[in-house]
Amino acid sequence: MFRPMNGSKHIIVNLNISPEEYTYWYTGSARTVLATSIDGRSVRFPANILQPFVTRSGIQGTFCIFFKPDGKFDRIERLQSK
């Protein structure tokens, strides 16, 4: 079960990005990803944070993006599916 660290700010997003779409971001044509969190908030983040999760079929899954107290990106983790 997912348990964020005490006081950490985070947002959870479901992503389904095709390999072609990610290549568009990663090659610099676009540098940010705009997604909607599971609670309806919009979040924009750098596309390069998804690099560790790229597969031949793109990027699929539920991810938790953590932020530092100043609101800047800290880390991203893939959440385990049930």
Image (cartoon, rainbow, N blue to C red):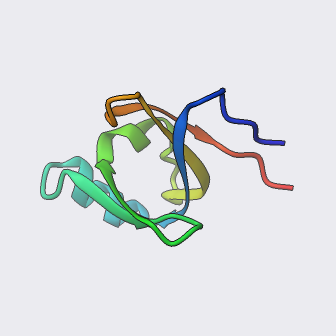
Identify which residue, 39 or 64, lies in the foreground: 39
Where 81 sits versus 21, above or below? above
Residue drawn 23% across the image and 60% down it: 24
Where 39 sits versus 76, above or below? below
Q: Residue furthest left?
A: 29
41 relative position to 12: left or right: left
Residue drawn 18% across the image and 49% down it: 27
| The C terminus - image quarter | bottom right
Q: Position of residue 55 (x, y in %)?
A: 52, 48
53 relative position to 25: left or right: right
Q: Residue furthest bottom?
A: 40
| The N terminus - image quarter | top right
Number of labelled discs?
0
Q: Position of residue 22 (x, y in %)?
A: 34, 57
Identify which residue, 63 or 18, lies in the foreground: 63
Among the 4 quarters of the image, the one containing residue 51: top left
12 relative position to 21: left or right: right
